[in-house]
Amino acid sequence: MQLTETFEFTEDWFSNHIPAWNKIINDVRPRRILEIGSYEGRATTYLIRACTGFGPLHITCVDTWDGSVDLPAARMAGVERRFDRNVSEAVRLAEAPVDFRKWKQDSTRALSALIADGSELFDLIYVDGSHTAPDVLTDGVLAFEVLRVGGVMIFDDYLWSMEAPAHVDPLNRPKTAIDAFTMVFTRKVRVLPGMPNAQCYVEKIAN
């Protein structure tokens, strides 16, 4: 059944990842999900529809909806309203109850609060907030603390850069941070093999 016509999206940076995500979802069967960076909720609505087939779902979405270096404030007009509407519709259509938490805050503060609160760990974490290397690395390190062993963290835009190829600033691309994270945490994570390299899929194998 096609449900996309009930949602309101103006951008699609996600649909090409769905085949890879379907494999992850079927393997992990996540019941607790954390999304860092939600924009209009295209990934959020996919997750709600895909994961409520396994039963009740909790999903926490962290975003400021204020924009970023690569998303100026002018492009954010109406984005939060569309996110709210899209998620509300996805929850209405879901196969099972959804415990949804919208956390409108900087990711560093939100993740630090989750760690400090000793909240229940997540099965799946999607890191798609700020795309500068320092921010991506901070999100990855903090998110690792609230991911369960056996859970998966997905880093978006592994090969993306803010500048043209001939003028890439390594600090303005996620790859620099993701490579640093996977190297430093090499005994605690496993990069999942055979997956598309537009994103990086990491399984937590130890605390």
Image (cartoon, grey):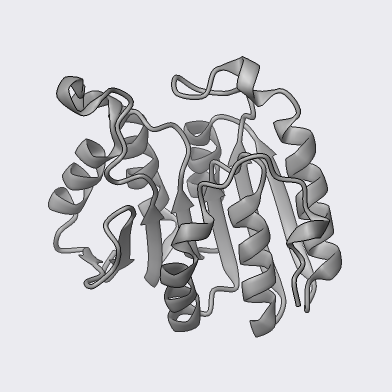
Point 17% across, 43% down: residue = 180
Percent x, y for residue 92? 86, 65
Q: Quadrant of residue 45?
A: bottom right
Q: Is residue 68 above or below residue 92?
A: above
Point 68% across, 82% down: residue = 53
Judge whether residue 119 can be spotted in this image.
Answer: no
Percent x, y for residue 88? 83, 54
Percent x, y for residue 5? 79, 58
Point 31% across, 68% down: residue = 203
User: Left of 203 or right of it: where is 129?
Assistant: right
Judge whether residue 45 can be spotted in this image.
Answer: yes
Q: Quadrant of the N terminus?
A: bottom right
Q: Quadrant of the C terminus?
A: bottom left
User: In the orientation shown, which residue stands out farthest toward the right?
Assistant: 92
Q: Is residue 70 above or below residue 128?
A: above
User: Left of 147 or right of it: where is 167?
Assistant: left
User: Left of 156 or right of it: where is 65?
Assistant: right
Point 28% across, 22% down: residue = 163
Q: Is residue 139 above or below residue 6?
A: above
Percent x, y for residue 183? 13, 51
User: Left of 143 or right of it: where is 72?
Assistant: right
